[in-house]
Image: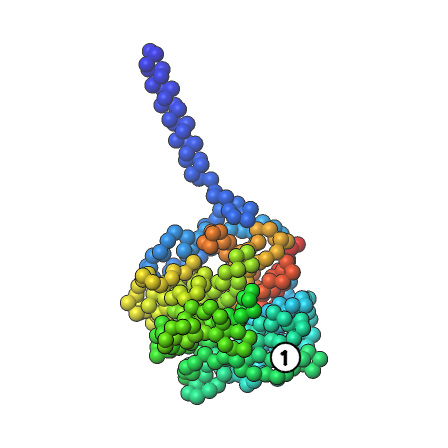
Amino acid sequence: MKAKSIFFFLVTLMGVYLVSCANNQAKPRAKNNSDTSHLPPVETKSPNSDYKPAFAGQTRIEGVKTTTPYNVEKIADGIGPVFGIVPMPDGRLMVTVKSGFMEIHDANGKLVKKITGFPGVLFEGQGGLLDVAFDPNFGSNKMIYWSYAEKVEPGSLTAVAKGKLNEDAGKVDNVSVIFRATPATNSTLQYGSRLVFDKDGNLFVSVGEKSITSARVQAQQLDSYLGKIVKITTDGKPAPGNPFINQAGAKPEIYSYGHRNPDGLDINPATGELWEAEFGPRGGDEINLIHAGKNYGWPVITYGIEYSGDKVGAGIQQKEGMEQPVYYWDPVISPCGICFYNGNAIPEWKNNLFVAALSGKHVDRLVLKDNKVVGEERLLTDKDQRFRDVAYMNNMLYAITDGGDIYRISKK
């Protein structure tokens, strides 16, 4: 009887243990930044291919939901086809209009000044006046830098110019072109291009590979600027320490290569690292952590397929010596401008990455931990708008649509 009692006691104990394990297994994993929600992935549509991710969490990560109440206000509308919304050092906003001018808006969206005097832009296809960045010493020198599609023989290219902002006169003075992403092609697609200054006052410029077959292969060639992120000084010279600066046959301005159409670029304020968003073809939109000298694979490796449905190249997703995206989407969301939230007003957003999605028609929130995506949320889906760019300023997010509506997102 004694042995039988011990046996039943052990069986009962084992049952309690198994139930406990099952309950613990079912509990949601605690999230970074105090977000403890546990939701299915936000993407519900079938992927374009049966390609498998290289590691867990590289795509279709579990969803999260913002718990802090926040307001969404439309503060401006109908500006026209735009590319960038960029905070000015004085707390206002500069909007780039693709047809060839900029507008200064105050933090409440009111138009303050239209700025003209830029070199002629090729406002065709995906071209036009693109991004803008402010000199680290803008307060004293009033210098701004902008990228644009420039018409040259035999077609067009991505160019970067600089000039002195003369706000009173509503124009830029002393304009000079400091960089041209040669070679020119007869394509009006996939110019890139975002501009970001690093802590040393050098300028990152993202350049697209122009889409056409004869140009896309140049993303892998170091004697071409197509499909690259370059790093230059304010005079357009190669930035000191660039990875290929002493390599024969390589463009010394190149910082990283193997990119398709990098339309998003920002520096993580917590780490100082450069992050990039890049359009894939059908599937394979990417978020990348950019390191000097690294090859990001396009068009050799990709999680997307051709628009025709065919494989891209050999149809491979991983290859030795080529970097994997931190995260990818299939189907695409068409990731354009990106920014990090560096405020405290909405605590769970601290150091999250926000992505303006064109075809996705939302602003994507990515929760990062140890340089991996651990949660995703889709914001502003009810607006049914193509979002072109997103910016952080003073504890708020500003998102601009393809047609030039500005939304401000702030704590309630």
Q: Secondary structure at mark 1?
A: strand
Query: At x 43% / y 32%, what residue is drawn?
Result: 20
x then y, percent, for residue 120:
55, 85
The reply to whether residue 183 is in sight is yes
Left or right: 43 with respect to 139?
left
Left or right: 226 with respect to 411?
left
Q: Residues within 10 Å of mark 1 (few under 14, many from 20)?
A: some
Q: Which residue is at the far bottom?
A: 153
- Rendered-image quadrant of the C terminus: bottom right
Residue nearest the observer in this picture, 167 or 246: 246
x then y, percent, for residue 176:
56, 83
Q: Is residue 281 above or below residue 16?
A: below
Question: Looking at the picture, which amino acid does disc 1 mark?
Answer: Lys
Colour mapping used in the image: rainbow
Q: Is residue 410 above or below residue 193?
A: above
Query: At x 33% / y 11%, what residue is drawn?
Result: 1
Residue with the mark numbered 1: 164
Q: In the rendered image, which quarter is residue 383 located in?
A: bottom right
x then y, percent, for residue 14:
37, 26
